[in-house]
Image (tube, helix red, strand yellow):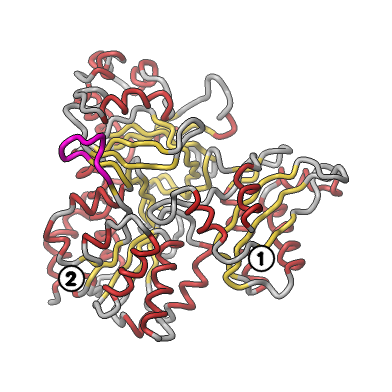
Amino acid sequence: MNLTSIVNKLYFQPRRRELDRYEHDGEAIQAEVLKYLIERAKDTEYGRNHLFSTIKSYEDYAQNVPVNTYEELKNDIDRMRHGELNILWPGQVKWYAKSSGTTNDKSKFIPVSNEGLQSVHYQGGKDVVALYLANNPDSRLFSGKSLILGGSHSPNYNLPNSLVGDLSAILIENINPLANLKRVPSKQVALLSDFEVKRDRIAQETLNADVTNISGVPSWMLSVLVRVMELSGKTHLEEVWPNLEVFFHGGIAFTPYREQYEQLITKSCMNYMETYNASEGFFGIQSDPDDQSMLLMLDYGVFYEFLPMDEFEREDPNIVPLGGVEIGKNYAMLISTACGLWRYEIGDTVQFTSKDPYKFIITGRTKYFINAFGEELIMDNAEKGLDAACKATGAQILDYTAAPIFMDANAKCRHQWLIEFAKEPCSLEEFTAILDSKLQEINSDYEAKRFHDVTLQRLEIIPARKNLFSDWLKSKGKLGGQHKVPRLSNSRKNIEEMLAMN
């Protein structure tokens, strides 16, 4: 029996039996989580202000606690960052995950309590392995090393042992020392802030390692792997790491990158497993390799609510707990967590594909969509459209963004796409036509607005120069880590900045 089989039997198989509760007890599990969170936080300042001690049901909770964005919690979080105790969560919170900013701020700082670190973030990582081994009992995952991409961190207001930075850096900083024996690169390299230097150092350190699994954001991991190939002089990645068996990926959609990974890693037994982990928590894991939807993780320190996107702008939307969701409906997700986020609008939109157990797909962002003309184009539409155009033309995409042109010199309105191709289509005209046609096929609102070109003309694609998106992120101080390009926007601000650099 190999090391992986032993660890699986002793550690991961008992956890999988606990996960079996998800099949029929999802709502009961979530009720337990809500009860726990309220009890833990009832004596915090936020708990006292919102009468947590009187809450006996979900209905009480929804009545007492308002829906929050970062703006509503920002002042409390800043007080916590300065060392104040018992504000949003009991005791002192020492770690803060730096996330992309809001309208008024360059960055958000998401509190990461010790309980949240253990019961949400690290538990998510453990369950990824548990579910992977359930589907791959012959795995030799622990026979080699794990290549895990991380960001960087810095002191938080110079408070002792308090850090602010990418969530991945906080996880690496606090990880069990035993796990470091199985992880590459070294901690020193993993926490470097300059991604271009880090990329080269990671490639050098891992070139001769026995890497069995890789974890990270697809775009940044691809950049590292390309450098590994350059240094090795090999044609395919399995020539460098013959025992590589799985890529655990998350952060952005994998669809635009899949073909490039499959060309880089040609072994038929390579596995890909999607996760939904964010600065705010760990929420989903792909439990079935033949099903692209993810299992909603219900027994962590996270309580979920769902706001129908067709009511997103309403003053009094019909927000529902888990038991009230409908399959196929688009929801904005709200979370309450063991890190002190209460009915927090995370900004992601999801759609359920199953309720026994609860499984879902990520459909986009509440802010990343185009609805300039009533077309309601979401990221899920964009990914499917691009996938169809790539398959039909042989193109490969590295990055993209899109925004509306409200009216040009000829009084024409359209969507403008800026796309960096890894492999350009033979005919950009054909690619454009297929993308436009596919969007009409899967989005009836877009189709209606495109009817006879009356409201909306056919979309326009502008090829981006090499590294345009990386250069734009670098100009924003957001190269590497978990930073990502905003895909869709009603505003032209981002695309205009990129076009000026193109």
Of residues 72 and 189, the one drawn nearer to the viewer in this rendering: 189
- 457 vs 79, left or right, is right
- For the residues labelled 2 and 1, the Cα–Cα distance comes to 41 Å
Residue 156 higher or lower than 6, as above or below: above
Of residues 208 and 192, the one drawn nearer to the viewer in this rendering: 192
Residue 145 higher or lower than 380, as above or below: below
First in residue order: circle 2 vs circle 1: 2
2 vs 1, front mark: 1
Q: Which residues are magenta?
A: 154-162
- Identify the image quadrant of residue 148: bottom left
- Amino acid at circle 1: Ala
- 60 vs 490, left or right, is left
- Amino acid at circle 2: Thr
> Is residue 462 on the magenta stretch?
no
Q: Which percent across, then down, holds residue 125? A: 26, 54
Q: Which percent across, then down, holds residue 485? A: 52, 51
Task: Identify residue for label 2.
Answer: 4
Tag 1's secondary structure? Answer: helix
Task: Identify residue for label 1.
Answer: 389
Locate the C terminus by quadrant: bottom right
